Image (spheres, rainbow, N blue to C red):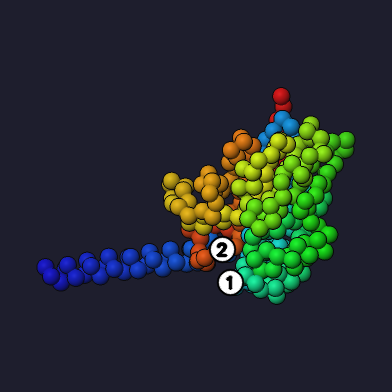
Amino acid sequence: MLNLRIIQLKRIFKFLLFSLLILFFNSFFFERYYVRFPIYEIESTRIPKNFDGYKIAVVSDLHYGFLNPEFWIRYVIGSINEQNPDLIVGLGDYVKKRNFVEELIHVWKLLPLLKAKDREVFVNGNHDHWANHSLSLRLLEESKKSIRNRIFEIKLGNEKIILGGLGDFWEDHIPIDQIFQHTDPKQFRIAIAHNPESADTPHTVSIDLFITGHTHGGQVRIPFLQHSPILPVQNKNYDLGIRNSIFNEMVFISAGIGWSILPLRFNCPSEVPILILKHKAN
């Protein structure tokens, strides 16, 4: 009887050990390095007909550096280009280390490899500022692809949409009204920002869509509940996917690619979301 009990305990131990190994492999390798391209449809009556089907690739939180080496970043960039997007938006946190300019300099040699049909635009995130505030801003401007504190119009035929770039919510806040105040309220307006909480800052100009990252989706999401217990934002509604701001404006949050604190992901794989604009008839 005792021997049977010992055999049963050994089987349970082996099963638990095997399960932990599978969990370790999934969280530390598969979900971190297998980048998916989920599709989200953004539907609105304000999206012009000519932009129906317009494809936006969202690149967020690369965190180039430790455990996210150059060859892998190049692979991710190549995979993004294969999606053949109309527009690529870079949302910041391109590096990880604080006070480390080498990573910042090197990653900006890689980011120009991203290619879209129309254009590529970038803003910075908090980690970029933490690496070196002044250098991060200089490299962003020197790329000639900065949308920080700028407005760009994208035209298709006689119709257009408006893009505006915000500074980082923590380290480089720029009022939304300052950026969009002279834009046409009849046009579909998209705000590009690193942190989704930028959408909750006071503004009088209406924004149709915020495209953001920063949260990593929480990195760990409880299965079935689809809840992230740890999020680097005050507004815990901002975890992943399409949400509404406190002003009832649409906010999209990407889970991004890199990691923070611990190099793992569970039920929250790395991603480069593809947003498809859809014209909705009145």
Please report the residue visible at 72 percent of the width from the left and 27 percent of the height from the top: 281
Residue identified by numbered label 2: 259
Describe the element under mark 2 as helix, strand or loop. Answer: loop
Q: How many marks?
A: 2
Depth check, front residue: 250 or 134: 134
**Residue at the disc numbered 1:** 67
Could you tell me residue 272's position as x and y percent? 64, 55
* Image x and y of residue 217, in percent: 54, 53
x, y percent for residue 10: 25, 70
In the visual, does 172 lie left or right of 231?
A: right
Q: Report how far apart the C-alphas of labels 1 and 2 lie in the structure.
A: 9 Å
Q: Residue 208, labelled with which disc?
A: none
- Residue 110: quadrant of the picture: bottom right
Residue 102 visible in the displayed image: yes
Tell me which residue sits at (59%, 63%) in the image.
258
Q: Quadrant of the C terminus?
A: top right
Query: Foreground residue, 8 or 164?
Result: 164
- Residue 155 image position (x, y, % from top left): 85, 41
Task: Name the residue at the right extreme.
Answer: 158
Asked whether the beta carbons under mark 1 and mark 2 sit within 8 Å of each other, the answer is: yes
Q: Is residue 248 above or below residue 165?
A: above
Residue 126 is drawn in which quadrant?
bottom right
Between 201 and 19, the one lying in front of the other is 201
Q: Residues within 10 Å of mark 2 (few under 14, many from 20)?
A: many
The N terminus, quarter of image:
bottom left
> Tag 1's secondary structure?
loop
Where 165 falls versus 7 (above or below)? above
- Going by the numbered disc 2, the residue's amino acid type is Trp
Q: Amino acid at mark 1?
A: Leu
Give whichever of 247, 171 is nearer the camera: 171
